[in-house]
Amino acid sequence: MKTAITRHAPRNLGLGLGAAALASAVALLPVAAATTGTITTYVIPTANSQANGITKGPDGNVWFTEFNSSKIGKITPSGVITEYNVPTANSGPRNIAVGPDGLLWFTEFNSDKIAKSSTSGAMTEYNVPTANSGPRGISKGSDGNIWFTEFNTNKIAKITTGGTITEFNVPSANSGPRSIDLGPDGNLWFTEQGTSKVAKITTSGVITEFATPTANSVPARMTAGPDGNMWFTENGASKVGKIAPSNGAITEYAIPTASAFPVGITPGPDGNVWFTENTGNKIGRVTTAGVITEFAVPTSNSGPQNITTGADGNIWFTEQNAGNLARLAVAASAGKGSKGGTTTTTGTGGTGFGGADSSTGSNSLTTLLVVGVGLAAAILGTAGVTSRRRRRARP
């Protein structure tokens, strides 16, 4: 069922800005800057949903998973949300991706299943052969199959569009394979949370692993970047890194915010790479040269989780703690590394080693404009946005 977004008049949300001061602040901003870094928040109808995975759908909408409420959902570019129940209760939908068949494929972490859904919400589920596998990351492959990670059982697997599953063991024990994505070389690249490695697997199942330069980096999510490299986040080191598929050379960049706990990562529409800071409560942008700009999320302790670029050319992300979806406007004039936020550049290099890897509710809208090194600008909000402490799944 769909829930329309209702826009309300501006109101003071306790930031200490009077109407005159707010108008003055907005008046000082150039038009181009006002379109960069604007974050709009949409409340998911189901409370305590723990929004998690997110991806651009084949229908022009953005699709997402709700880990705690066992649903998947979609949001239109204008903010209309529709939710669909997963057939298995307490399934723990985790990550979601578009398959080669144009369907939405997602992992069910709690129920050890892989599922597919049409854009109208018709679903089919498939059991993973290994019990307690904890399927987590998922991506389409270059071979016409869908690939996924088995976080608990140290495996990478593929599933045909018809549901046949084949599993491959990761060489390193207790590797905790987490995220997976298709690389420009036709291989599937994945992160090993437990061993601080990133790895690749060919479509025939040959795995090569590469250690990150920083020990205990805890690699999280991975994506193909606009520069031909594979980019990834490091939970434990508060860094983002990139690895060259051609030779395994890894470069890391420290995030300005300490203990940022970066999670999701995606190529942006602007030629940069964008990522979430789960603990830092920010969205980060890194140029392919390593210049990082951060944007504060308006909802306190929102827990930004995963991130994608929508069909509308903006950045969309899930707020796990707050149960929200959010959109960050990306101006075409922003270029690579310009406009908004606070900017820092750092980098360390290293070379890895080769080895043997429907419900309804009322939505609220809040807009924050991030300018320069601080927040300041305009905020649109609605009544009924409350701060709630929620039990959350591990990012």
Image: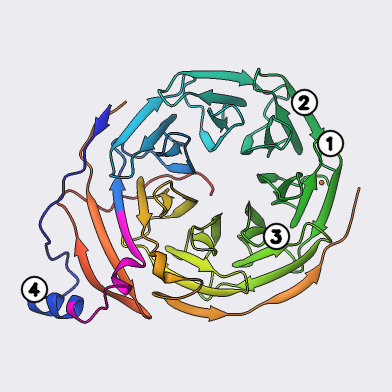
Mark 3 closeness class: few <14, some 14–19, many ≥20 residues within 10 Å: many
Q: Nearer the viewer, mark 2 or mark 3?
A: 3
Q: Where is residue 193? Give x, y as percent.
A: 69, 52
Say whether residue 17 is visible: no
Q: Nearer the viewer, mark 1 or mark 3?
A: 3
Q: Does 184 sit left or right of 314 as displayed?
A: right
Say whether residue 395 is visible: yes
Q: Where is residue 215? Give x, y as percent.
A: 75, 66
What residue sits 18% from the left and 57% below the top? 381
Q: Secondary structure at mark 2?
A: strand
Give, as a single range, the part of the protein colored magenta: 27-40
Query: Residue 229 bears which disc, if any?
Result: 3
Query: Residue 166 bears which disc, if any?
Result: 2
Alpha carbon separation for disc pair 2 and 4 = 61 Å
The type of residue carrying mark 3 is Asn
The type of residue carrying mark 2 is Thr
Whichever of callouts 4 and 3 sits on the residue coming sooner in the sequence is 4
Q: Does 266 sit left or right of 302 as displayed?
A: right
Q: Secondary structure at mark 4?
A: helix
What residue sits 51% from the left and 58% below the top? 268
Query: Residue 205 bears which disc, if any?
Result: 1
Q: Secondary structure at mark 1?
A: loop
What residue sits 21% from the left and 38% below the top? 4
The type of residue carrying mark 4 is Ala
Alpha carbon separation for disc pair 2 and 1 = 10 Å
